Structures are given as C-alpha cells and as structure tokens.
Amino acid sequence: MGGKPSDPDYYRKYYIEHGERIRARVAAWRAENKDRVAERARQRVREGTSRSPERNRRSRARLKAQVITAYGGRCVCCGETETEFLSIDHVNGGGTRERKVVNGGGLSWRLARDSGYSDCYRVLCLNCNWSAHQGNGICVHQRSGEKP
C-alpha cells in the first residue's frame, strides 16, 4: 500500500482490502457487548452528542447523489434520472450477502464510493432493479428487447 498512517487514503485502502475481516470483528464485539453498546448510545442521547435523524438524512442524501453522479446519473437500463427512484445494484448479484456482512442496506452506497466506484456496482431505477431480481439478473426491458 505504501502510504503512511497519517495519510487518509491509507486508511481507505486498508479498509477496502480488509473491510470484511474488520466488520466481522466489530460485529462479534458488538454481539458480546450489547449492554455496553446500548448504554453508550443512551449516554450520547443524554449528552446531546448523538447524530440527529435530520442530519443523518441529509448525509445519506448527499452520499446517494454523489454515487449516482459517479455512475452516470441515470438508470443504466431505462434512463430514469429521478433520484428518488434510483438505487444501487450489484452487477453480479451478492447484495443480500453484502448487507448481512455490513449490517444494513444503506452502506452499499458507501461501499460503492469507497471501492472507487468499481464496476461491480451500477445504478438502476427501482423498477429495473426489481425486474432484474425477478428475472435472474436481466431486466424486463432487456428480456423483451425494448428500450423505454
């Protein structure tokens, strides 16, 4: 990797390389320390240092917009551009497995960004994503040969 520990890119690259092992260790620690984790969360709420739901929403919206823009800003199948309808898709499947490992669906946006926008992800509208899920990875637009 060649970076210095003070270099932010060093940590990003390290996490991309070793993320699965790190997430597994964190999940195991959290499972063993549920009471401690819950008490710390309650303490942050009491102190007013927990992140507000509105701040979280804005942060997720910025991340989603950033990833969508990096992947072309539209559904790769039908061309839909309305951000509310767009989702991240795993080109070769494996989204369910990834969500179980990282403990949540919203992290796919972050993983897509942290992977350097690798070609294992793509942007699909929710209709095309569901259709591809139902059609063994092939959207109805591609199965029927039509383009909307």
Image (cartoon, rainbow, N blue to C red):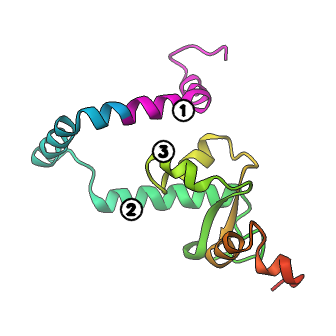
Query: What amino acid type is highlighted by mark number 2?
Result: Arg
Q: Residue at x 38, y 36 (%)?
A: 27
Task: Determine whether label 2 and label 1 are within 8 Å by CB.
Answer: no
In magenta, the rendered stretch is 1-27
- Report, in whole angstroms, how far the alpha carbon at label 2 lies from the one at label 1: 24 Å
Helix, strand or loop at disc 3?
Answer: helix
What type is the residue that disc 3 sits on?
Val
The local crowd at label 2, few if under 14, some if 14 to 19, many if 20 or more residues have their Cα within 10 Å, is few
Q: In the rendered image of this protein, does residue 85 appear above or below residue 120?
A: below
Residue 135 lies, in percent from the top left, at: 74, 73
Question: Mark 1 touching mark 3, by CB under 8 A?
Answer: no
Q: Which residue is mark 1?
A: 19
Q: Within the magenta stretch, is there residue 144?
A: no
Q: Nearer the viewer, mark 2 or mark 1?
A: 1
Q: CA distance from mark 2 to mark 3?
A: 19 Å
For the residues labelled 1 and 3, the Cα–Cα distance comes to: 9 Å
Q: Position of residue 144 (x, y in %)?
A: 86, 84
* Residue 87: % across, % down: 60, 66
Q: Quadrant of residue 132?
A: bottom right
User: What residue did someone put label 2 on?
Assistant: 57
Relative to 90, residue 130 above or below: below
Q: Nearer the viewer, residue 68 or 26?
A: 26
Q: What crowding class fits label 3: few (fewer than 14 Cα within 10 Å), some (14-19), or many (20 or more)?
A: some
Residue to which mark 3 is pinned: 102
From the top left corner, tell me how far across and down residue 80 is, in percent.
70, 77
The reply to whether the C-beta atoms of the residues labelled 2 and 3 are less than 8 Å apart is: no
Q: Earlier in the sequence, mark 2 or mark 3?
A: 2
Query: Where 44 sits versus 92, above or below?
Result: above
Q: Is residue 10 magenta?
A: yes
Nearest to the observer: residue 63 or residue 104: 104
Name the kind of residue labelled 1 in the image. Answer: Gly
